[in-house]
Amino acid sequence: MPLPPLRKPPGAPPRARFLARLLAVVALVLGTALTGPVPAARASVALTRVSDFGSNPGALTMYVYRPASLPAHPPVVVALHGCTQNAQVYADNSGLPRIADRDGFLLVLAETGTANNASQCFNWFQDTDNRRGRGEALSVRQMAGQAVTAYGADPQRVYVTGLSAGGAMTAVLLATYPDVFSAGAVVAGLPYDCTRDDGPYTCMNPGVDLSPEQWAQRVRDAYPSYTGPWPRTAIWYGDQDTTVVPRNATELRDQWTALHGLPPTPSRTTTIGPDATQQDQYLAADGTVAVEVDRVPGIGHGTPVDPGTGTDQCGSTGAPYFPASICAGYWIARFFGLDTSDPGGGGGGGASCHTASNYAQVQAGRATASGGYTYAKGSQQNMGLYNTFVTHTLKEQPTGYYTIADNGCP
């Protein structure tokens, strides 16, 4: 944490002014010695403030990042910062603006301030802010509506993600406005309505244990007349998080798999990214990923980023709570189905097809070889001998799940 600037008290004598300057110089020298050279200033992402988006009962601030090239009727991603942060910090470090540029979606950043919460946290734990039609939840819903109206965005493709208190508020929005948000990604967040019987700090650590059906009922209670479908939900957490402990990811998984009528056992498990993040996916009957849990190894509380220029890299570690690891934003966009470089998307959108020899399919990572035979990744269908002579067409839908489609692949 940076040292606060030293200020001269009114009427300070020359000796006091001298000491203040001396202390400031010492602090600067020590700070440079301990932290190394001060990094060059990095340009902030240009955000546009939107002042009129509704009644705004939660007294939030709305910002928009609009890519230079935006398709007609673009998707919308709403992003919610964590405690002690603001919209600009989240835009500058999360990597989401760069992903918006690549994938062509409108990025809306909601911001709270110290007038609402001394630590600049979204008030996910207050009934006045976490219920449909109230406070901060309604303010964010109004921002989403403004984005659709003002920018001609697609109301069927509105998504939300957030970190920590913003992650917990993401769960609030998915529960209270399932008719608005078709999917969400909760990063280091908590189950909806955890504080009904417990305080927020108990929910955060050690966490609250309820049955999947009890958790699911709390979401149903948020909008009793709603009959579905429920939003698809991705859950991200660091396995070393002591602020919002990993138990909350398990309870979130139970809440949303129960809502989708799925067992808490993953349909498939794989590893992704440079750090072998474990990704558990829970598939609906139509093959879409209804719930996804991503366990990031070796990090604590924060939104993981992977600075760099690669396709699957993003973000900056220039502020607290952005640990270097995997670019969560890239994978979240895939889960939402927004990744333009991936026709299948993360949500089971349009299929992609690949025709090649069994040897080439294995080399491309679409199949595995064992005992001289080849097996399609995901379905584990036997494709025959592992060689260059046997050829198959594999259909990928959703991402990473392959089936043999030799008779046609739409």
Image (cartoon, rainbow, N blue to C red):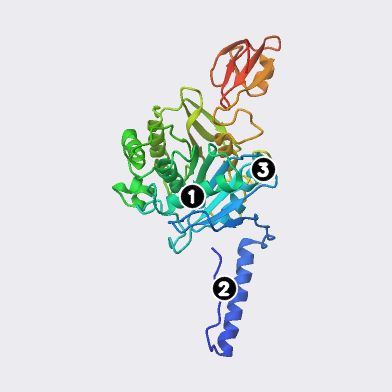
Q: Position of residue 186 (x, y in %)?
A: 48, 43
Q: Nearer the viewer, residue 68 or 225?
A: 225
Residue that sits furthest to the left in the current view? 197
Decide which of tag 1 and tag 2 comes sooner along the chain.
2
Residue 277 visible to an observer of this rendering: yes
Mark 3, Cα crowd under 10 Å, few <14 / some 14-19 / many 20+, is some
Amino acid type for the residue under numbered disc 2: Pro
Viewer-closest of 396 and 35: 396
Instruction: Return the mark for residue 5.
Output: 2
Work out how far the residue at label 1 is from the one at label 2, CA to CA, in angstroms.
39 Å
Q: With respect to residue 69, does 278 lie above or below?
A: above
Label 1 SS: helix
Task: Identify the residue shown where x is 60% and y is 75%.
Answer: 24
Q: Tag 3: residue type?
A: Leu
Residue corresponding to mark 3: 70
Which of the marked residues, 1 or 3, is nearer the chain's N terminus?
Answer: 3
